[in-house]
Each structure stands twice: as C-alpha cells, then as structure tokens.
Amino acid sequence: MKFRIGYELDYHFPQATPVILVLNTHYTRVSDLERPDHIVISPSVPISGYRDGFGNWCGRILAPPGYMRISTDTVINDSGLPDPTVSDAAQTPVDQLPEEALVFLLGSRYCDSDRMLDLAWSLFGHTRPGWARVQAICDLVHQRIAFGYEHARVTRTAFEAYEDKRGVCRDYAHLAIAFCRALNIPARYCTGYLSDVGTPLPYPPGDFAAWFEAHLGGQWHMFDPRNNTPRIGRVLIARGRDAADVAITTTFGPRGGDPPRAGAEDLLVEYGSVARPSNRCHDADRRMGQ
C-alpha cells in the first residue's frame, strides 16, 4: 500500500529568525520512501542537519524577514496492516530495564508524572501489569478527554489535561505517558502522520498526529489513546520525552503574519483518491523568547 505524505507550513517573520525543524520521516521508515522527503524552503535558504539526543533528524535554518513556506511531498510504502496488538506483553521490573529506557520513567515538561502518582495507583493499581494495564490507561484517557482543536493550549500539562477534560491528540498522549511513568512503565512521545484509511466519513482535515510507545516485554509498543483502536497508515517522524522534544518547528524570536498550516496532507492509498490539503496546526510548533 502506498501513502502520500507531506505538509505546507506558512510563516511570516518580522526579522531574521533562527528555526529548528523536526519534519523528516524517522530513520526507521526512510527505506520505505519512494523518494526522499527533502525539506523545501521558499525563498531558499541554507539548511544544516543534525541528530538530536533521541536519534531524530533535525534541520537548522536562519529564516530571513518576510514570508516563508516550508514544505515536502512524497510517497511512502506501507504494509497496510493495522497497528499490532501484543496482549501478553509483560511489564519489566525497573531493575531489569535497559539503561536507554530509564529516562522515559522520569517526569518531563508536559508529563508531570510526579503529580499523578497517587491518582495513577488508585485508578490502575488493581489492573494486571503489562499490556492490560497500559490499555486500561488508554481507555480512561480516551473517555476522559474531549477532543477539539479549539481546546488546544501549548502550556497544558498532563495533570491539567486530566483536570480540564479536553484537549488535542498531544494531551491524550501526555496524560497516558504520565500515568505510565507513575506506574513504573517507560513511555515516550511520538509524532507523525496518520491516515484515515478504515475510518468512517467524513474525514477530518489532515494534520500531524501524536501517540506514544510503552516499553513492555523487552521492546517498545505503540499505543494511541486519542483514537484507541488499531489504525492503518501510521508514519513516525520523531520520538522524545514529550511534545517539547519533537516540536515540528521551534522559532527563536518574534513571529507574525498568517498562522502556520500543518500541511500533513491526507495520505494517499494505492488506487485511492487524491489527498486533501491540511488547514490546521494543533500546537505542533513552539516559539522561544524574543
């Protein structure tokens, strides 16, 4: 199965502004691309690349004053299979976890697991450790939060998402991650593309998506509390502790003009219809101090 993936991000910078970009398909899926997902910048400026501490491919540019469009458009091959379920995956005792998983037990900017300890154990302490416990977390988060782009708030933490009972997909992921960490389950935040294949009409506007991975049975497993059902056509861009680590763009300075459009286009299935353009960006970028 083939999917068309891409985005268009429009910015207006009042002055020369350093920008970090996390937009390339994750290295674990690069071999599935039919052509490279090069970042196209108009007007053209030099771009340099580096790997961050989580293995994500990042780009750096100095955006000149004025209008700028950042985009890509490519096709990726996919198995066409839904997200796997491994119901017998067991929880690993902390003393037996690999060192690289330990950082994902700690609280982070948006996953304030230290504030969730008592609540997490009161809600899930009776559940069977392992896959069943993480799925119980996803079930509660899916029911607890009402989804809506109008509910997006870039400063909302997991604890606040639990209290507010509303948010966007990043809030679902943050809350589930915080519960997992409070229960000694390593969990990491993921962002990427997600197709509408297998879902009922009408399709929502295309956008970037957020989910998480929990370390169970010696490996990482994908969970999606926002949709809470296996989906087809999930393409990873980046992983981190939370959304602060994998913002699609981070700008260092003021920014004005039209808001960015997260152009994660609706994915194109082989023998399917042409993709629809996106028109929303759900807090997928962030701005640093001026």
Image (cartoon, grey):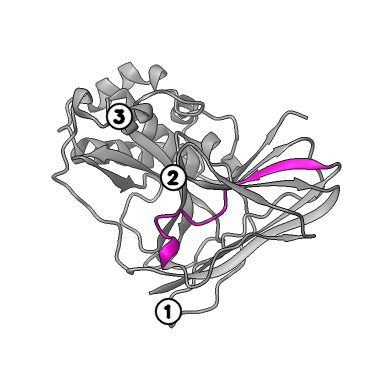
Q: Which residue is the site of mark 2?
A: 190
- State whether residue 78 is above or below residue 66: below
- Mark 1: which secondary structure? loop
Q: Residue at x 40, y 63 (%)?
A: 233
Marks 1 and 2 in Cβ contact (< 8 Å): no
The percent position of residue 63, horizontal first and vertical second, equals 78, 48
Q: Residues within 10 Å of mark 2 (few under 14, many from 20)?
A: many
The stretch drawn in magenta includes residue 256: no
- Mark 2: which secondary structure? strand
- Range of magenta residues: 16-31
Q: Residue at x 60, y 62 (%)?
A: 38
- State whether residue 95 is above or below residue 30: above
Q: Which residue is the site of mark 1?
A: 270
Q: Residues within 10 Å of mark 1 (few under 14, many from 20)?
A: few
Q: Nearer the viewer, mark 2 or mark 3?
A: 3
Q: Amino acid at mark 2?
A: Cys
Q: Please count the marks in the image.
A: 3
Asked where in the image residue 219 lies, by quadrant, the reply is: top left
Q: Amino acid at mark 1?
A: Glu
**Sequence-earlier tag: 3 or 1:** 3
The percent position of residue 113, horizontal first and vertical second, equals 39, 23
Q: Amino acid at mark 3?
A: Glu
Q: Which residue is the site of mark 3?
A: 99
The percent position of residue 16, horizontal first and vertical second, equals 83, 42
- Tell me the distance, in whole angstroms, between the alpha carbons under discs 1 and 2: 25 Å
- Mark 3: which secondary structure? helix
The stretch drawn in magenta includes residue 28: yes
